[in-house]
Image (cartoon, rainbow, N blue to C red):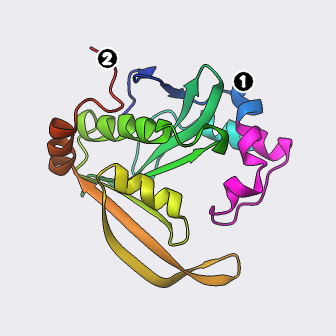
Amino acid sequence: MFRPTYPIRTARLTLRPVTLGDLDDVHAWQRRPDVVRWMLGAEPRTREQSQASVRAMAAEDALRAEGDCLTLAVVTDAGVIGIVELVWRSRHDRTAEIGYVFHPDHGGRGLATEAVTALLDRGFDEFGLHRIYGRCHAGNEASARLMTRLGMRQEARHVRSYRFRGEWADQLVFAVLADEWRSRAATAGPLGRAPT
């Protein structure tokens, strides 16, 4: 089982499990068409739908078995500005998938990079993962840029590989290995890491 010690603190952020009290903040982005635009099967949510989503995310506080999702709220003085998640894809291959959603009002300041960095650090250093990958719609340039900023390499472009909003769509796959992550962290400095 992998359950980080909470809260996880970075230079500007606190990462912690989602709570039922986060409903207003989560609904503030889940109701926005520009946020759910790239999410498979997602439409802007009603408050009741966001409540069900928050309830589900609140139960995702640890990785107990292959297939589990660890979902953490990303918190600033402004409240919960997004979530980051790690999905345990393979015990044998020590592989997980990263995911994230952020309120657009908090973009452009490197907060998403800082939050995902903290989760990748835990995945590699505490959980002992070998490989972490992420996927996005080929048109989702912001997500592709974030994974590139994190030092993840684009491994594939799956051409018209899945149905997205009634049409065939391309999917980009990015990944980073544990030794690559540690090498990058050693040369890049303490981005997203808590002050010591």
Which residue lies at the image location 46% right of the left edge and 85% below the top edge?
Answer: 159
> Which residue corresponds to mark 1?
21
Write the start and end of the magenta stretch as one range: 26-51
* Residue at the top extreme of this rendering: 196
* Residue at the front extreme of this rendering: 108
Say if the magenta span includes residue 78: no
Q: Select label 2 or label 1 by which is in front.
A: 2
The percent coordinates of residue 141 (x first, y second) are 51, 63
The crowding category of the residue bearing disc 1, from other C-alpha atoms within 10 Å (few below 14, some 14 to 19, many at least 20), is few
The percent coordinates of residue 70 (x first, y second) are 47, 40
Quarter holding residue 79: top right
Circle on res. 195: 2
The percent coordinates of residue 102 (x first, y second) are 59, 43
Sequence-wise first label, 2 or 1: 1
Q: Are marks 2 and 1 in contact (CB under 8 Å)?
A: no
In the displayed structure, would residue 190 be above or below residue 29? above
Which residue lies at the image location 39% right of the left edge and 55% below the top edge?
Answer: 147
Three-letter code for the amino acid on which mark 2 is drawn: Pro
Three-letter code for the amino acid on which mark 1 is drawn: Gly
In the displayed structure, would residue 47 be above or below residue 66? above
The percent coordinates of residue 99 (x first, y second) are 49, 51
